[in-house]
Amino acid sequence: MSITHIVDFASATTEAEHYRPDPAKVLAGDPAQNVRNHYSSPCNQFSAGEWACEPGQWAVSYSEHEYCEILEGESILRDSSGNARTLRTGDRFVIPAGFEGTWEVIERTRKVYVIFESSQ
């Protein structure tokens, strides 16, 4: 493996994939999203990239462990008991596999993510 295999997010030319959550999971707004998955491991259990979303709220259920760093915006993550955490530019955190609740984008949010899918 050589230095040419290093993935530099700043110079990556990954095409954005545009999508919306399943309409049955949307609770408010129109959370249009895009993701640029800059790297996936050969086993497809590990991936990293950038994600962005417009204001809205939807139900989430994590089968993966996800590290996030908020690059811009503001969101609120709520667990299934209604406990909330506001996420803002500069926040870094891990969402463990098994987390269920809602993600609400208050102000357009962009994040870097690193995902490990443990259920494969």
Image (spheres, grey):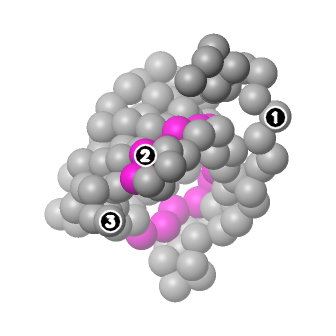
Q: Depth check: 59 or 93 in front?
A: 93
Measuring from the top left, give residue 59's x and y in whole percent. Answer: 42, 69
Q: Amino acid at mark 2?
A: Phe
Question: Most prominent secondary structure in the magenta stretch?
Answer: strand
Nearest to N terminus: mark 3 or mark 2: 2
Disc 3 crowd, CA 10 A, few/some/many (<14, 14-19, 20+):
few
Three-letter amino acid code at the position of disc 1: Thr
Mark 3 → mark 1, Cα distance in angstroms = 28 Å
In the rendered structure, which segment of residues is drawn in magenta?
A: 45-59
Residue at x 24% of width, y 48% of height? 96
Which three-letter amino acid code belongs to the residue tagged 3?
A: Gln
Residue 111 screen position, x and y as percent: 56, 35
Q: What residue would you read off at disc 2?
A: 46
**Residue contact between numbered discs 2 and 1, judged by CB atoms under 8 Å:** no
- Magenta span has 49? yes
Secondary structure found at label 2: strand
Which numbered disc, 2 or 1, marks the residue that appears first in the sequence?
1
Mark number for residue 120? 3
Measured as percent of width and height from the top left, residue 104 is found at: 48, 54
**Residue in the picture at 65% in, 39% down:** 38
Left/right of residue 104 with respect to residue 16 in the rendered view: left
Residue 91 against residue 74 in the figure, above or below? above
- Element under label 3? loop
Q: Which quadrant holds residue 1?
A: top right
**Left or right for 110, reference 24:** right
